[in-house]
Image: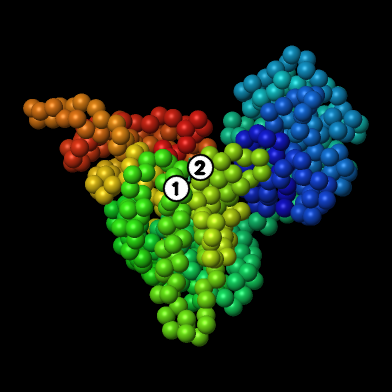
Amino acid sequence: PVLVVDFGAQYAQLIARRVREARIYSEVIAHDATVEEFAARNPVALVLSGGPSSVYADDAPAIDPAILELGIPVFGICYGFQSMAKALGGVVANTGGREFGRTTLTADGAGVLHQGLPAEQPVWMSHNDAVQVAPEGFEVVGSTPGAPVAAFENLDRRMAGVQYHPEVLHSPHGQQVLTRFLYEIAGLEPTWTAANIADALVEQVADQIGDGLAICGLSGGVDSAVAAALVQRAIGDRLTCVFVDHGLLRAGEREQVQHEFVGATGARLVTVDAAETFLSELAGVSDPETKRKIIGREFIRSFEGAVSDVLGDRAAAGDKVDFLVQGTLYPDVVESGGGSGTANIKSHHNVGGLPDDLEFTLVEPLRLLFKDEVRAVGRELGLPEEIVGRQPFPGPGLAIRIVGEVTADRLALLRTADQIAREELTAAGLDGQIWQCPVVLLADVRSVGVQGDGRTYGHPIVLRPVSSEDAMTADWTRIPYEVLEIISTRITNEVPDVNRVVLDVTSKPPGTIEWE
Ligand code: XMP
């Protein structure tokens, strides 16, 4: 892979995505990994990411300089650019030339990195320090008002770097610059395509499961459907899909999974009715993390319970189901604290929410993929657009969209509100613009309203439409007022006990997409 070295900023994930958009496989690695750890991952190039520190701070994160001597191509970005400059003998200083936000890069003709791009281009900066003198053997190929050395390259050593952030959309030519480094300077070939990914994953899964039996929890979402389709391709009908109806689903979801997924794949499907168990386990609980842990645990208990159904007569022959397939994605892993040095924001039900005494070996073929890659693989496997194009819906379902205790009445109410919002957003043709739109019930909040001639004392419903590329960051979607008006009117008229509809206008960060 191309290893993106994480210096502790938010950018490493995004850079890995961008490298993959150039169709080259990429993973994140911690900056304090040893030379041996780097080498063990067979990197074809390194990208040093941005970071929060000054390279001259006492505790400034740095990679072992020996890593730069491995003979592999290196690209430095922002802090990574400075860190590389310093390690290779250049000079970095704080000259007061701070730049934050948009500035203009001048790169007129010299060098490979910016070839074919406009001589002046907008780029996104965020720095206090700047490289004053490039290391020996490096040609300066770009400058900005605050950074005379804003880009350099050394074609013999296949190394280059930029002070700005090419990975963000505010640097409109950034992706081209990164791609030029990968293709023209590092000499890499674009091989990370949906077809190759699917083939490699099918092979990996076949190796892992051998001649064992597996079950796959289907949630109705894209991820578990693609994971199941991959595993089915690898092991055929030694896979059984298990759909747990935990009573926290949206209107129509159970039927949809049964028809669409089975229709598309012909996979064996067992449905478990677990609504009563989930509700009784969730009774009296309003803390989000506790809810998530309970749901994670009960999912597993339901899978365990389904095993005897799955095995049927085979149990007598001594067969066992050893493997549980999950559609865990890279962002789930990172956000559940699985990426080194990352805070645990929330326990995704299928990562941090797993019980300790798990009886299955996990098979997680999508563990290193981003959502758009999962969709591409799903299409490659022949899944229909209704499945691969679907907006994400979290495994814990409506339970984490009721702020407060989860009860059957509250679920019914939220289900109606959610259905109305979905119908109207679809009718307005907004589905393509919206990543997903959680509809949230503030069950512990009441406000006074008036309906007919009487006073009401009801609950608010929150609409949380977001636009995103990968759910790691998101912005609130600007839904036209007319559409909001229809949704608001319908929800307050049609949903009992709801007398207010409010719109969440928070990006992520600082908010998360789901309220819990
Ligand atoms: P947050 O709320 O963390 O959500 O910004 C990011 C994305 O993840 C989804 N999500 C989950 N998906 N199990 C899932 O399968 C979970 O426990 C879970 N929690 C959040 C959320 O819907 C959004 O797409």
Is the residue 309 above or below the residue 412 in the image?
below
Q: Pick whichever, 374 or 481, lies toward us.
A: 374
Quarter of the figure with the C terminus: top left
The residue to which callout 1 is attached is 292
Image coords of residue 448 (percent x, y): 20, 26
Neighbour tally class for label 1: few under 14, some 14-19, many 20 plus, Cα within 10 Å: many
Q: Amino acid at mark 2?
A: Lys
Residue 235 visible, this orientation: yes
Q: Pick whichever, 315 or 1, lies toward us.
A: 315
Question: Which residue ends up furthest to the top in the rendered image?
Answer: 96
Q: Are marks 2 and 1 in contact (CB under 8 Å)?
A: yes
Lower sequence index among marks 2 and 1: 1
Q: Is mark 2 within 8 Å of ligand 1?
A: yes
The residue to which callout 2 is attached is 346
Give the quadrant of residue 58: top right
Residue located at (87% from left, 47% from top): 71
Q: Is mark 1 within 8 Å of ligand 1?
A: yes
Residue located at (37% from left, 41% from top): 286
**Secondary structure of the residue carrying numbered label 2:** loop
Residue located at (83% from left, 31% from top): 85
Q: Amino acid at mark 1?
A: Arg
Neighbour tally class for label 2: few under 14, some 14-19, many 20 plus, Cα within 10 Å: some
Disc 2 versus disc 1: distance between alpha carbons?
Answer: 8 Å
